[in-house]
Image (cartoon, helix red, strand yellow):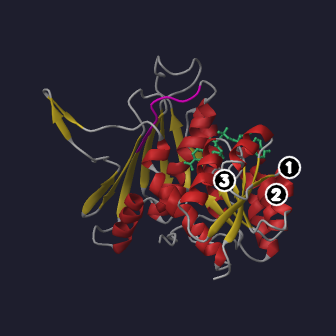
Amino acid sequence: MPDDLRVGVIGVGMMGADHAERLVTRIAGARLVAVSDPDTGRAAELAVRFDGVRSIGNPLDLVGDDEVDAVLIASPGFVHEQQVLACIDHGKYALCEKPLTMDAASSLRVVEAEEAAGRPFIQVGFMRRFDPEYAQMKSILDGGSLGRTLVVHNIHRNKTVPDTFTSEMIVRDSLVHEVDVCRWLFGEEIVEITVLAPTPSALATEGVLDPQIAVFRMAGGGIATTEVFVTNQVGYEVRCEAVAEKGNATIGLGQSVFVRTDGHYGGEIPDDFRFRFGRAYDLEVQSWVDASRRSEVVGPTTWDGYAASAVCEAGLESLASGTPVKVTLADRAAARPVHSSPAVN
Ligand SMILES: NC(=O)c1ccc[n+]([C@@H]2O[C@H](COP(=O)([O-])OP(=O)(O)OC[C@H]3O[C@@H](n4cnc5c(N)ncnc54)[C@H](O)[C@@H]3O)[C@@H](O)[C@H]2O)c1
């Protein structure tokens, strides 16, 4: 193993700041050396919290900086393409938060850039693959004792979201996680998507279709359903049940401490996804650091990012029309098996 991986973080809002702190406090073999954000005050404020961290004004300068070995991209999705392509150009490993880019065409350009470079550089931040519960479910299904997986049911609920969270973001930013989970659990592409919206909750922002129900048809004939409800008022709830021929497996029941008191029983439902998936983020970033130090890429690939973008694009079309929409993926050698499990340490 070479020396510590010197990491730069691009975009230090909610996720970037969380990852920066993770890199400094919980990740072995990495050193946070630089941060960059157009909100230079925010970047400077974060940098001074840690020893030896520089704030670099232009994110592309951070990518090209000689003291930065690898880049964690946590900027908004609409600037990912340019930043990921810059990482590939400079031959630097990057962990890019989901979504890879905002649409299928731009995601495919990233796949093609890696192809042209002759090797992968990018891990896409579908961190649920690193969540211990999801990883265990995947390993049970792959083990074959339950038989073939027939159906997957997902629930994805937030207590509330900012008023700026639109119907489209429910597909692109929320449902995209279940798109990746289902491709990964089934080990197959999604070939058709339907996104339906019941009469919205009166508590949803005016004009926003919340909740939404998505149905995926898998290439092998399986079906997945997902409810996304981002203003459910209860808390952050992510559950997944896989129904197979000889049994079923469920994760996300959130059974931690169970308290009985004063005529009631139960536990807490946290409303912050960083709490529910904290361990998954740690394992994701640690795997990325370890793989980068070995000059490898593990976990979700640019092809996974591209396929997810294509499914979401079709999902938005379905949300508008109310009818099923076929998902057509580029036919290329770059397509990698969707069932590859990440190397979880
Ligand atoms: N994996 C997950 O569970 C998860 C959860 C939340 C967000 N995300 C993803 O993380 C990314 C960031 O989301 P967030 O919630 O932290 O957003 P945020 O709005 O809190 O932070 C984004 C930051 O990026 C900065 N920024 C804007 N333009 C930039 C540019 N051109 N270059 C660099 N930085 C720029 C903003 O100033 C801001 O500080 C998004 O891609 C989002 O989808 C992933």
User: Residue 32 appears in which quarter of the rendering?
Assistant: bottom right
Magenta stretch prevailing secondary structure: loop
Residue placed at 55% from the left, 33% from the top? 322
* Left or right relative to 286: residue 159: left
**Is the CB of mark 2 within 8 Å of ligand 1?**
no
**Residue 102 makes an appearance in the image:** no
- Answer whether residue 159 is magenta in the image: yes
Give the residues in magenta: 155-162
In the image, farthest residue toward the bottom: 1
What's the residue type where badge 3 is placed? Phe
Q: Within 10 angstroms of label 2, few (less than 14), some, or many (20 or more) residues? A: many
Q: Quadrant of the N terminus?
A: bottom right
Q: CA distance from mark 3 to mark 1?
A: 20 Å
Residue placed at 24% from the left, 64% from the top? 246
Query: Could you tell me if the residues under marks 1 and 2 are in contact, i.e. CB atoms within 8 Å?
Result: yes
What's the residue type where badge 2 is placed? Leu
Q: Which residue is labeled 1 in the image? A: 58
Residue placed at 14% from the left, 27% from the top? 262
Could you tell which of marks 2 and 3 lies nearer the N-terminus?
A: 3
Is label 1 in a helix, a strand or a loop?
loop
Q: Position of residue 243 (x, y in %)?
A: 32, 56
In the picture, the disc for residue 62 is 2
What's the residue type where badge 1 is placed? Asn
Is label 3 in a helix, a strand or a loop?
loop
Q: Which residue is labeled 3 in the image? A: 50
